[in-house]
Amino acid sequence: MRRWLVLRYWLLPEPIAKITEAGDTFRKGIAVPHNHLLPRRSALPGRVHHGGHWECWKCIGISGKDGVVLVGERKVTSKLLQTNTSAEKMYKIDDHVACVVAGIMSDANILINTARVQAQRYAFAYQGPMPVEQLVQSLGDTKQGYTQFGGLRPFGVSFLFAGWDKNFGFQLYMSDPSGNYGGWKATAIGANNQAAQSMLKQDYKDNITREEAVQLALTVLSKTMDSTSLRSEKLELAEVFLTPSGKVECQLHSPESLDKLLVKSGLTQPAAEAS
Amino acid sequence: MSIFEYNGSALVAMVGKNCFAIAADRRLGVQLQTIATDFQRIYKMHDRLFIGLSGLATDAQTLYQRLVFRHKLYQLREERDMKPETFANLVSAILYEKRFGPYFCQPVIAGLSDEDKPFICTMDSIGAKELAKDFVVAGTASESLYGACEAMYKPDLEPEELFETISQALLASVDRDCLSGWGGHVYLVTPTEIKERILKGRMD
């Protein structure tokens, strides 16, 4: 017994020393209020480290009566950066849940992997899809754990989750680095989210259709962006909806179908693409 | 009696020209008593990959659920379907994990690669793979299936001929085995479509 106590006492001082070293940002027991963990330290609000570049972007989610829409803005920071045609910020968690990430990508990858495993564990145990809120909550629990104990840094990631389950239908959730989450009709995270949020507050109507939700998301995104023209390489879009046969589907739009959508919504001219 | 023969099963897969077929009987028994006559022991992993699990039915179902778990995570991470060869390695690894308390199953895997090349393979309950160019068999009727397939199989059959061959081989074999039978379930997979057919055999 006595030996055990001695050992424990010996183990304790280590992490405390680390905490003091890390400074106020990582102090024990402090929940990080938003995804400004890195931004604050580097004094670049809304900027996040990604692939060796500082990237700045925003994500919008809108839920309608027949589907949920997620839009993410991607920013090309350098001419030399290899342009990635596939999705970088949109991830499918399971057949019925998709998410978009705002924050540190390396942290996000860990969390996305945990979420996917969690969803499959549920499906294995109960032979059915995991309820969306339960999935969001389980990820929140993981995030929360890292705000409570010393020596470890919290996950610097916010998520928007879009999903469908048979009990509550279409749902949209936002989860922040502290592990807090909430259900939303429409919301925005990432850079410049205040402006987007207030635009959504004005323009969102209850019972909008999925198509209207796509329109609204694209309009809000284009109006809150710094650059003037909205092009397919600057954005990612995912939809969760039910097929006519009643099966839930997550669709990630390809650059081609995004171009079509943008032309349809009148945000870009079709002539520009032809040249 | 071996635990592999508790429920009874007959399983066969054959390669044709740019296509494959996989077939199984439909009986689920408890020793000599028949419990169900519409049992499914062939499972679809994705559009061009199938696995049949012969042996103890309860282990087959659990094993299938574990395979779905791993396959789904692979699909999400890699954003593509698993190649048949890769899947065979996965099944083998999962089986060998339980080397000293195995799943009492003998799987048959059949799939089409991205280049429309058919792949078939079987393995024992601890994951030792056996690859074949022509046909593979498993289950309590495996001995008679070997005979029937040796006699009837020809290389490079067209899809419809392949369906006829595998069906005749299966029906002929299950009649020589007390523990399998009660019709058959055949999947015929070509690069463009999957045909699923249910065979009526001697229903006794």
Image (cartoon, helix red, strand yellow):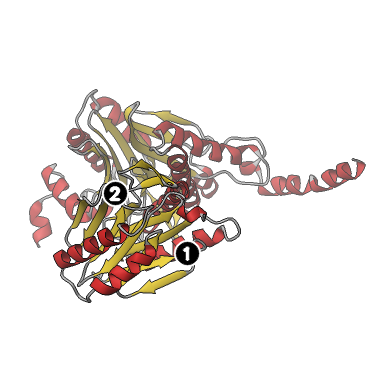
> Could you tell me the amino acid type at mark 2?
Trp
Tell me the residue at 33%/40% (across/down): A96
Q: Secondary structure at mark 1?
A: loop
Mark 2 or mark 1, which has the lower sequence index? Answer: 1
Among the 4 quarters of the image, the one containing residue A191: top left
Q: Crowdedness of circle 1 by 10 Å Cα count: few (<14), some, many (20+)?
A: some
Residue position marked by numbered label 1 in the rendering:
B124
Q: Residue at x 44, y 42 (%)?
A: A119
- The image quadrant of residue A204 is top left
Q: A86 or B48, which lies in front?
A: B48
Query: Which chain is indicated by disc 2?
Result: B
Q: Position of residue A103 (x, y in %)?
A: 45, 46
Specify the amino acid type for callout 1. Asp
Q: Are marks 2 and 1 in contact (CB under 8 Å)?
A: no
Task: Point out residue A70 in the picture as x, y percentages from the top left corner.
Answer: 30, 41
Residue B182: numbered disc: 2
The reply to whether residue B16 is in sight is yes
Question: Do circles 2 and 1 both sit on a common chain?
Answer: yes
Q: Residue A101: x, y in percent?
A: 40, 45
**Above/below status of A131 relative to B134:** above
Residue A129: quarter of image:
top left
Which chain is indicated by disc 1?
A: B
Tell me if residue B35 comes above or below residue B4 in the rendering.
above
